[in-house]
Amino acid sequence: MSMAQRLAAAARMSPRQIINRARAKLAPPFPVIVPSAPRELMAFITRRCNLHCGMCPFVHPAEHGPASFADISRERFAEFLARFAGAESIGLVGGEPFLHPELFNFIRMAAGHRMRVSLATNGLLLDNDRISRLLDSPLAMINISLDADTPERYRAARGGSPIEFNAIITAVNTLAAERTKRGSPLEIVMSHVTSVCTAEAMPAYVDFAARLGANGVIFQNLIPYECSPATRVDQTLTDTPDNRARVAALLQRHNPISVIAPKLRPVHRPGFFCPQPYRLLSVDGDGNIAPCCIILPHSSYGNVFTDKSAWNGAGMRRIRQAMRPGHLEDIPTICLSCWENEGHFI
């Protein structure tokens, strides 16, 4: 980011966000008790969905997430935003967020706190009315989780029909065209959960997303929830010479849009550091929290609606302690296969 972009971003921040950012930057490394509030939020506003994906831990119960939680209410969402108003961004996720009747209110409420608001959706409910409302809203980014560039791959990845696949690509095309017509700054991103079985399709997916009018593609390595055969750890992309070459080739090709390549899972990991428990807080409709974007909210990490100190509560302190150099105690097993960390401690 250039100096001009940094200054422009700072000008859009609220006093609480500026103070919170300063506290985060002045904090000592690896604090168990974080002196700043989270800078990033993620809200699982509903667990309801209109698809039945084989890789979803809501469909197939996983060790790292609750079996169910309620839709977050407008009052609870407002409480969550007010308590963590120092955050600079929030992602609205599910389930399928469009199934929540308050979604557009949530977007406006979060933007009212000067947060950058993003939305992750499977795209099935993107009709003309919702497209118009999205473009009228302060939403900054929409992530279409399609995971496939053909009806056959879509069925394998998400269990959807060719009719549903075609409806989504028509909707994305319409969204992109309407965005251009209105001069909207909305960023359209298309994501792709990448595994051993789907890695070869990455270049084709980039070209496919570009034709639909997307600004970029995010390739995310498969999350090894071990909740179904599709999410076994042996299906993730490991850090081998072949996979490194595949990722390098993807980034070096003349891509028509921006591309974020999948992070490869290290083969050996004696220890590691993940920055997310120090900056990000996930919450579900019941108020349960999680320390990152991979582990699903769970009561074992705390609850923001019953404990105002949950951000630095016992559950969050425990996982931060485990992240400190030389410690691996109490780290969830999914962390040992996670690629989202930013460095290793040997």
Image (cartoon, grey):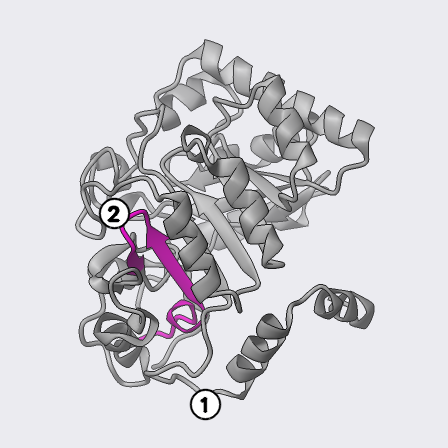
Relative to 207, residue 35 above or below:
below
Relative to 292, residue 322 above or below:
below
Task: Locate residue 300 relative to residue 345 in the image: left or right.
Answer: left
Please provide percent x and percent y for residue 30.
Answer: 39, 83
Which residue is nearer to you in this view: 32 or 36?
36
Question: Which part of the image, by quadrant, shows the C terminus?
Answer: bottom left
Question: Which part of the image, by quadrant, shows the N terminus?
Answer: bottom right
Which residue is nearer to you in this view: 119 or 81?
81
SS at circle 1: loop
Task: Identify which residue is drawn at 37% across, 26% down.
Answer: 158
Question: Which region is colored magenta?
Answer: 271-289
Residue underneath mark 2? 225
| Mark 1 neighbour density, 10 Å: few (under 14) some (14–19) many (20 or more) | few
Residue underneath mark 1? 28
Using the rendered view, name the quadrant where residue 218 is placed: top right
Q: Amino acid at mark 1?
A: Pro
**Does label 2 or label 1 sit earlier along the sequence?**
1
Task: Identify which residue is drawn at 61% across, 35% down.
Answer: 206
Task: Identify which residue is drawn at 67% across, 22% down.
Answer: 173
Using the rendered view, name the quadrant where residue 79 is placed: bottom left
Which residue is nearer to you in this view: 139 or 192?
139
Please provide percent x and percent y for residue 168.
Answer: 54, 20
Which residue is nearer to you in this view: 32 or 240?
32
